[in-house]
Image (tube, helix red, strand yellow):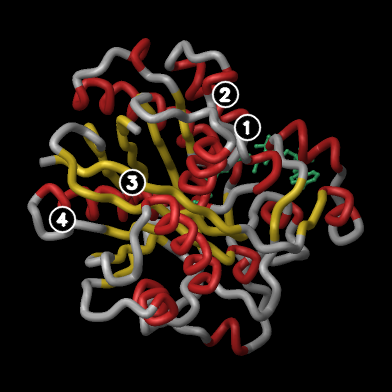
Amino acid sequence: MYSRIAGTGSYLPAKIVTNADLEKMVETSDEWIRTRTGIERRHIATPEETTSSLSTEAARRAMEAAGVGPEDIDFIAVGTTTPDLIFPNVATLVQARLGIHDTPAFSLETACSGFIYALSMADKFVKLGESKCALVIGAECLSRVIDWTDRGTAVLFGDGAGAVVLTPSETPGLVTTLLSADGQYQDLLKFPYGVSFGFDKLRSGAKAGIQMKGNEVFKLAVNTLSRLVDQTLVKGGIDKSEIDWLVPHQANLRIIQAAAKKLDMPMERVVVTVRDHGNTSAASIPLALDTAVRDGRIQRGQLLLLETFGGGFTWGSALVRY
Ligand code: ACO
């Protein structure tokens, strides 16, 4: 038994913030942002929108594409690092919004790797026969954890959500997934406030935002993704020439180009959405996947490599026969 992607969906907030808009907020330039990151614009949630509301819209679209209704869903996993609340978790909020009852529903906090981690969990539930219709979501409202006065991070991130529905299949489907992490680098990328660590600094009015040593993260991301690509191909028993599409995490165009080079893939076979979405962390891969499915680039039967790297550090991949 395998799992297969029966449908994809995504949702972006209507509000768009361009590099020109950011030029008015911090000392930066459209040229710097474009050449260092590949980003030109990003979508930002309104105060009324939350991670669960974005997730719900993405889920509705994925369920419609899969031809399933709320009564069919029997498992919900959401990868997010920006939940609406500490609890209830985002998956249960989505469950309530969609009118789904009596299913497992949980969120995973593995930063940019959240969707791949959630996908891997769902794959196992389907393979074991414990789920016949799993909803897997990656969603973020990163705009809520950005220090908008810090030009080093404010230009990088965006909000959005993507989702897939997984159903059982006698043939793959998900060929293999690979997950890993290494906590020793936690100081290179973090949002350093929270429940047991304490909200005191936030309460005292100190500026709170994502903290990142971008240059060091960049190098580790490129090296780790290079290793991850090799390991995934070996685990899946696949030669790199067999891959039709690379669907990478969208943090920085230069990191994506390095991964494509490693695979000897021309950029025409790489799904790139970072220009329009920025880095949407756990949402970026399902957003990119849905974009390329809906515009007709990704076709049924094609082999996809999904790969990600993010805060923790955490990283992971999935080889998918779409
Ligand atoms: N506008 C103009 N100048 C800037 C800006 C900005 N927005 N931000 C930084 N600079 C300046 C710096 O101050 C520095 O100036 P200096 O040379 O006078 O000191 C100069 O630009 C170069 O800064 P670097 O940080 O070395 O620039 P770099 O080329 O490394 O690009 C970037 C920075 C885009 C952040 C890059 O390092 C990167 O993409 N890193 C990886 C990000 C990533 O993958 N994160 C993981 C996922 S995120 C997650 O998990 C939530």
CB of mark 4 within 8 Å of CB of mark 1? no
| Between discs 3 and 2, the one toward the N terminus | 3
| Between discs 2 and 4, the one toward the N terminus | 4
Would residue 42 appear left or right of 96 to someone viewing this image? right
**Disc 4 packing (10 Å; few <14; some 14–19; many ≥20):** many
Tell me the CA gap for discs 3 and 1.
29 Å
Where's residue 35, x and y in %? 76, 31
Q: Callout 2: helix, strand or loop?
A: helix
Q: Amino acid at mark 1?
A: Leu
- Queried on whether the Cβ of the residue with tag 1 lies below 8 angstroms from ligand 1, the answer reads no
- When the figure is inspected, residue 153 is found, relative to residue 60, above or below; the finding is above
Q: Callout 4: helix, strand or loop?
A: helix
Residue under label 3: 6
Q: Amino acid at mark 2?
A: Gln
| Between discs 3 and 1, the one toward the N terminus | 3
Name the residue rendered at 57%, 82% in the picture: 201
Name the residue rendered at 83%, 55% in the picture: 22
Residue 216 appears anywhere in the view: no
Q: Count of labels shown?
A: 4
Q: Amino acid at mark 3?
A: Ala
The one nearer the camera, 223 or 185, is 223
Residue under label 4: 125
Q: Amino acid at mark 4?
A: Phe
The one nearer the camera, 30 or 239, is 239
